[in-house]
Image (cartoon, rainbow, N blue to C red):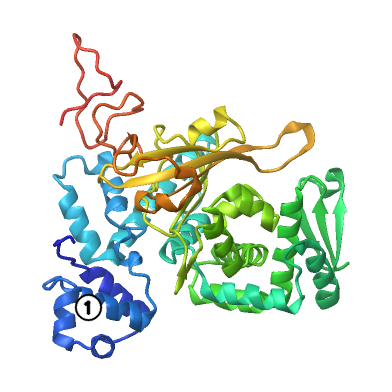
Amino acid sequence: MSDKKLFLGGRLKRLRRDLGATQAAMAEQLKVSPSYLNLLERNQRPVTAQVLLRLADAYDLDLRSLSADEPGGGAGLDEVLADRLFADLPINRHETAEVAELSPTLAEAFVRLYRAYLDRGNLIDLAAFEGRDDGPPAPHTTPTDWVRDLVGVQRNHFAELETLAEDLLQKIKADQRDLAPSLREGLLHHCGVTVRVMPVEVMSGTLRRYDQHRKQLLIAETLAPASRTFAMAYQLGLLTHGEAIAQIADRFTPPDRATRQQLKVFLGNYVAGAMMMPYGKFLAALEETGYDIERVRSRFGVSFEQAAQRMTTLARSGARGIPFFMLRVDAAGNISKRYASGPFPFSRFGGTCPRWNVHDSFKTPGRIVTQVIETPDGERYFTLSRTVRRVAGLLGGLEDELAIGLGCELKHAAKLTYAKGLDMAAPAVVEVGPACRICERRQCPQRAAAPINRTPLVEETVKSVSSFPFLA
């Protein structure tokens, strides 16, 4: 067993404040003195295994969340501080890790401020391009980014929504073997809403539209069966439990109306996914099949993407699944989805590393490719990737081909059918990194730029493996 001491003062303090508890109240729950808790929060004492167990018991806490990186954690600060703006400041990773540990909320605030700075720069450039002297005011953060950060903090698990979805399934007496008829009948019986599948020309570029006046849910004919089912589940959730979803959204105090709407849509989508793949049955099917996504998705009548996203939500206390992370990217590397129930150092201001074979999926459409990757901190992950299509049969053949990247820490890979035959002790490993501008791997043949915080090395008589060598 490792003898490394665990200092979690900043996270412990943040947990206590999120719970609205005083030091005295938390100390009583943990059966320690307030003065000892104060020392723990100031990192003057390491957190013992006994205190960790009491934390888990008292607050129904997944201990993995204490060790996972926060949205504004060390990795996020490293990426921000790699900007050329800070090139003259000798800031090292030890300092950023210390700030992130001692003051996680302050670190997150700094990352948000940096993102607003980037957004403002983009808006100024746009205003100049359009010949205007003044641009629109810079947002503090986009609604999408705000919701992504919230979901990251929650590890993409919302216990209340799981309960709400289960109650809805009981209410409509759902037949899980073929959910669509149950949803269609539930919309008609409980909401007076009929469902109509419409020609794509009539939908005017939309895939789903609820006509409140005629009490009709209109679904484009281009949607695959799994997406049609999802559309009905989403609408049923909003119509029957819209107030509860709104109350949950308001509890997180979104900063403006647009962000609140974005959060409500996410929560509604979460309910729909939980209805199509009920927690207990879905987790049992995954464990029974060795997390064989193709078999499980067929059993529940869902798409590969829907199943992969649901796999990142399995963090129920006492019934946790493997903590997966998931990305959805296009051929250019733009990330349109990013979820994680476990640790993974996502790049917050760039795309994915080209050495991660999620990009190679585009060469073998519809086939699953696997890989073991290692991040600069030495952590290893087992990953699998596959292409999906966002919309089938769109007019003019304009359907999008995207790639789904799914993975978990290597220690969990033995449970996966995709890892059969893999030498867990000495697997073939590909070193990956964050965005090139902050990655310090020197011998990378796919580097697109030198790290911003390093001096480029230009030599007339030497050709390096990397196109952008730099000084150590």
Q: In this picture, is 165 found above or below 399?
A: below
Q: Which residue occupies the foreground of this view, 344 or 201?
A: 344
Q: In this picture, is 167 found above or below 79?
A: below
Q: Where is residue 245, by image quadrant?
A: bottom right
Q: Which residue occupies the foreground of this view, 204 or 308?
A: 308
Q: Is residue 117 left or right of residue 251?
A: left
Report if residue 166 is visible in the image: yes
Secondary structure at badge 1 equals: helix
Please provide percent x and percent y for residue 301: 71, 55
Mark 1 = which residue?
Answer: 50
Identify the residue at horizontal 33%, vertical 23% (top origin).
445
Please provide percent x and percent y for residue 142: 49, 55
Disc 1 marks which amino acid? Gln
Identify the residue at horizontal 69%, vertical 70% (top origin).
237
Identify the residue at horizontal 45%, vertical 43% (top origin).
420
Q: Where is residue 122, by image quadrant?
A: top left
Report if residue 302 is visible in the image: no
